[in-house]
Amino acid sequence: MPFVPHTENDIRNMLEAIGVESIDELFDEIPKNLRHDLGDKKPLALVPEGLPESGVARLMRDRANQDGTPLCFMGAGAYEHHIPAAVWEITTRGEFYSAYTPYQAEASQGTLQLLYEFQTMMASLTGMDVSNGSLYDGASSLAEAVLMAVRANRKSKSKRILVPRTTHPHYRKTAHTIVKNQGITLEELDYDQQGGHIDPASLSDEPGDFAALVIPYPNFFGVLEEVDVLTDWAHQHGALVIAVVNPMALGLLKSPAQWGETGADIVCGEGQPLGVPMASGGPYYGLMCCKQALVRQMPGRIVGRTVDLDGKPGYTLTLQAREQHIRRSKATSNICTNQGLMVTASTIHMALMGAEGLKRVAAQSHANKQQLVEKLTAIDGVTNTFNRPSFHEAVIQLERSPAEVLSALAESDILGGYSLVEDYPELGNALLVCATETKNNDDLEHYAEQLQQVLSK
Amino acid sequence: MSNVPAELKYTKSHEWVSVDGDIATVGITDHAQDLLGDMVFIELPEVSTSFEKGDDCAVVESVKAASDVYSPLSGEVLEVNDTLAETPEAVNSDPYGSWLFKLKISDASQLDEMLDAASYSGVAADDSH
């Protein structure tokens, strides 16, 4: 069927129905200085004419070259890891290459099986009972986990969630934006400035009851929180535990299911480190796992394995009765899809790496970070900010503004880290640096030399 | 035609109530279970929670849909039928034997506003067209 655009009549009728004079009026909310309809010109008049394919290819090549190929020591939520060439070779095969869970889901048994395998791997990595087929990104997965905890914690009935400031600042902002209109408040929990972690001793003073405590692991500073004590504290106070994890770190670290006496209740996080390259801010995908008892509160697509009439195994979307296409306004969330393509890559990545491979990547990343911090803090005027163990990121203290230092390093094609000045002004000239398994000794040495040069100027 | 026992009271939203003194036992009707289809999960209220008449207080989930159950009367939950956690399908096979929860009635006058079997049969019949 061809695409049928609205007729003039349709448009007039619609405008009349909502009481608006013209289409332009619909854009009144956008400040004038941001609009392109200057004078008589129509919106989008300033978009240039189309280019031939060869012209576009040339333009894109030129722009890509401007990016350079910097040596990356920046983490802060997105991490550079080696991705075997086979991962995207297989992911982009015609059979897999789609961003969506198919609309006729059960007709696409291969895609469903892949999602089922993904869920199995995630459940095994986090130690949890169940996983969904993914969410949009790490930040929105935290928001969904918060909504889920409020729904699920029927004992406390509280709409307050305790969120440490050691949680990724963007995740906190995103979660706030998504949950605030449902009357849910995110209460900030401050961190210990020596350790860069939540001091469990600071918790006993917390008044009131909470639906959940969020525990980032590793936290935004790379630091490992005292997950056992925190988990038990939350459960003793009637709160659920939401773990925000880096799945790569779980290759090495204690899985959330084993935290404290009974483990975390909901696990969410960013899946990018598992096979998704870094590219201009995305795409990312969110992961979410939980205990069996909470499965009916879990949002998103869930694939189940069953048998057909002949007893042969088959895959199907399951537990859909609470999704929006069936339950409308009472649905568990607005998520009716997943990040299919990123999850496909991740599943293939994990299958190729294996549990042992992931563990080695995590261990090498940690070892490289240790070396990097050692080399950097050997420089005059550079010190460790925190005294607690961290995974593959750490905060270092400079005597000069991190922004200045970073732009000087950028001139030698080094992405030197993430300045914490805006998000954590109380830490002074603090810089978050990261080293993954992709760095070798020469890279680490090179960064240290360049930093020393910049600082000595 | 679905089964509508004469001794029970009903709501338009398809709950049934059996009254014993100031205790009301609540379930969903034969007609409701027939509309929803095979039950897979029943989410029951917490004991000692109080509801106003009309509050959503439980969820019955079938292979087709998850539907709210509304409290037919105001009151406090005294007991819930935990056996439904393992056997939600009992609501299909025996809707009037498979109660969901028991309420301590706080306002007995609300009972007068409930439907009797004949009126509810009318509601259910209208619904089926």
Image (cartoon, rainbow, N blue to C red):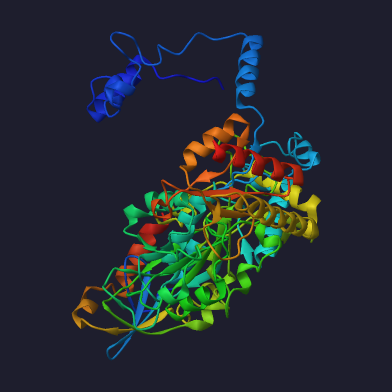
Q: Quadrant of residue A340?
A: top right
Q: Is residue A30 above or below residue A184?
A: above
Judging depth in this view, the residue of A328 and A346 nearest the camera is: A346
Furthest-bottom residue in this view: B21
Image quarter hosting the N terminus of chain A: top right
Judging depth in this view, the residue of B92 and A348 nearest the camera is: A348
Residue A205, given in percent of the width and then of the height, sits at: 36, 77
* Left or right: B42 in relation to A249: left
Q: Quadrant of residue A41?
A: top left
Identity of the residue drawn at 73% across and 48% down = A109
Q: Is residue A167 above or below residue B100?
A: above
Residue A203, given in percent of the width and then of the height, sits at: 41, 74
* Left or right: A187 in relation to B88: left
Q: In this orientation, does residue A246 appear?
A: yes
Judging depth in this view, the residue of A366 and A288 nearest the camera is: A366
Q: In this orientation, does residue A304 appear?
A: no
Image quarter hosting the C terminus of chain A: top right
Furthest-left residue in this view: B109
* Left or right: A279 in relation to A298: right
Identity of the residue drawn at 38% across and 71% down = A210
* Left or right: A318 in relation to A86: left
